[in-house]
Every structure is written in structure tokens, then in C-alpha cells.
Image: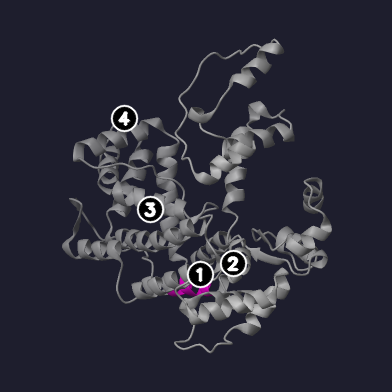
Amino acid sequence: MLVSCLTKAGFTEEWLKQNWVSFVSDGASIMLGKHSGVSTKLKMRFPNLLTWHCMNHRLELAVSDAVDKVTAINHFRVFVEKLHNIYSKSNKNQRELLESAAEVGSQVLKIGRILDVRWVASSFRTVRAVWTSFTALARHFEKASNDDQRTCTERQTYRGLCDRLKSPEFLCDLGLMYDTLHELSIVSEELQAQTMTLLRADLLVKRAIRVLTSFKTQPGEKLSAALEAKDHGTFKDVHLKSNPKMKSINTEEFLQRLIDSLQKRLPFEEDILKDLSILDTSRWPSEPSIRYGEAEICRLCARFNVCPDQAIKGMRDLIESPQTESQNLKPLKNCMQTFPVSTAECERGFSLMNTILTNKRSLLLVSHVSNLMMINLNGPPISLFNPEKYVNSWARHHRTANDPQSRQCKSVNITKNSKSVWNVL
């Protein structure tokens, strides 16, 4: 199906064999299966194709592995899910929380889900919301537990939530998850950048592992604040009370599990990556020989159909003048930059498709959905759009608009690449 779509778009199989560099997908077995996966079948037809498992999906799987192995996290996750259900399904509870925040001068952020199918950045936003809204949550739970208009069961539920929220054990768990997910969310968001390369991704992952390792001996900012509040018995003017029934997360065990999962799920051991690292001058020895990296350069040239003599000449120029950019190495560097590190762009496309293809618009054809997505993702902003020819076409066909209402459109960042696409269109 994929090859047929490329063929219809004008890419012949012979051209693909010479120019198709890489294929990236999520970790579904239908994509990366060893026997009948899409990547396996593609490599049978295109032997030089580099198949890659999305880095963001690998990161999520690594976090999921660590969470599954540390059972104490389940209690933390269940409690945060309870908070999400309380405020996402009741406008009354949302209003009361805002009133409680106004009384204590606190801020309220939206509490979402945590450690589910969403990416790490989403889980971090939820933990940050609980940390930021801590005082308002405590105030709301206290008022709800003493509200005579609620049933006895509801009051008892809010009393239990209040006791758990005010426990130093939960506060320390919240600080630990805040620091950890904050670090991982930074990596996750950077991996989604269009300019991200495999070598840069390797650097970011290894750096994140070193930061998490340091958390074992030197707690992060929020965990340090939680430990200090535990000693003082007060956090954000909320008195803490220990709950002996609560099982706190073992900090060192959780961090070690997470580090092990990252090292297992995010390896950079493939030969192609070792060869590409030759182009990174920061990984060179202090005094490389004039023929340093020639074997790796030759393998890369054979894989990407690049002239080896030109690339070796560029490599020697780079060894003699590391501060200057060699034009002879540009074809190889362009190939390296075409490797997609993650499927973030595809995921954004799926999200946009779900927004366009709602239950009330289920009769849209695939071609129409594709056109709407193309306009939304690559179309010019309203300020640069000339509707004259479209209005004339509309008028010639005697069409009428049923909805005369208009809405303000969001601003669009104008870049040089975007203008080039608009000129083509």
C-alpha cells in the first residue's frame, strides 16, 4: 500500500532503491515485526533502507516499563486519576475549586491523566497542575468533607482525599515525579523537533540518563522542597500529617528502574549510527590521523550512493580545518539530516485528522480530508490569502454559503520554507 502510494505520486521503484534513505514508525508489531512487519517487507525490496523505531514511542515504553516494575507508583497514579475524574466530570467541583483558589490566593491548572497512552509531556503537565494547585485542592477537600449538602459517602470520600493529599508521603512522591517527568518531557519535546538528528538525539538521551542518575544522590528542586516541607510539617500554608497506611515510592529504586529501561529501550548500537558519528567532530580523538574515518565514510557512501572520492576529500579537509564546513561532505550530511528521529509529524497529522473527521462529518471522502489537512498544515495565513479567484469560481457555479458567521483565526508563524510551499500551491 505504501509503495503503491509512492508510485502513484511519481516515485518509481528504481528511484526509491537509489534515494530512499529511511523509514520510521511506532513500535506496533504490524510495523516492526521481524517476519511480516512493514519494515521487514520494505527492507526485502530496498536493502539499503534504514528502518527506525520512533524515539518518542521508545521513551514512552521505557517509562511504562519502569512504572510497571515499581508497584508503589500505582497508588500515586490512581490518586491523580481520581482527581482528574472529580474535576473533569463535574462543573460544580470545578467551580468550587476555583472559589477555593480565590480564597487562598492560589492558582489552578487543569488536571489531566497521567502515565497513560499520552506522551510524557502530558503526564508532566498533570503533575505540575497538582503541585501548583496544591493549596486550592486542600482547601476544596476540607470544605467538601464538611459540606452538609453532600451525602455521608461523599463527605467521607473527600475526607480521605484530603488526608492523602496532606500526607508528606504523597508530597514527596509528587516532588519526585515532578522532577523526573520534567526532565523526560524536555527530552520528549526536543525529540519532536523537525531539525533533530540521530546524533543529537543520542546526546540528549545520554544526558537525560546522567541527570536521572544524579537525582539518586542529589534530589531535584521539587523533591528537595518536598523534603524540606516534610521536616517543617507545612507546605504552602497547608499543615501536613503523616499517613502510616501510605506506601511511598522508593526514590532510588524508581530512578534505577527508569535508567535501566532507558538504556534498554534507547540503544544506539547499529553500525549505521556508529558510522554517522564520524561526522561529529566532538567525538573525535584529540589528534586524528589524516585517514581517520575513511572506512566509515566509504560504508556510508556505498549505502547512500554518494561519490566516495568526494566524501573522503571532504573528510580530510574537515580533519585539517575542523572549524570550516566542507562542501564535499554536504551530500553525506544531507543524508544524515533526512533520518526522522520520531513520528511526531505523523502523530500531529492523526490528531488533525480526528479533529476534521468528526461524527457529524463522517461522509467526507479521503481526498477531501487530505485536502483539508493540507490546507490546515501548510496553507498561508488569512493575511496572505487572496480569495478573489475562489470567490469568482464560487459565484460562477451559483453556490451559496449557509453559514454567514465568521470567526477570528489564530495567527500563523511565517517562515521562509512556508512561503516556498505557498508559491508552489
CB contact under 8 Å: marks 2 and 4? no
Question: Which residues are the magenta region?
Answer: 256-263
Q: Residues within 10 Å of mark 1 (few under 14, many from 20)?
A: few
Q: Which of marks 1 and 4 is nearer the N terminus?
A: 4
Q: In the image, 286: left or right of 420? A: left
Q: Which residue is drawn at 36% across and 59% down?
A: 178
Q: Can residue 269 be seen in this view?
A: no
Between disc 3 and disc 1, the foreground one is: 1
Q: Which of marks 2 and 4 is nearer the N terminus?
A: 4
Name the residue nearer the viewer: 379 or 348.
379
Q: Mark 1 points at which residue?
A: 325
Q: Earlier in the sequence, mark 3 or mark 4?
A: 3
Q: Residues within 10 Å of mark 3 (few under 14, many from 20)?
A: many
Q: Which residue is drawn at 52% across and 58% down?
A: 195
Q: Which of marks 2 and 3 is nearer the N terminus?
A: 3
Between disc 3 and disc 4, the foreground one is: 3
CB contact under 8 Å: marks 2 and 1? yes
Q: Mark 3 points at which residue?
A: 127
Q: Residue 330 carries which label?
A: 2
Residue 17 at what x, y percent from top left?
79, 63
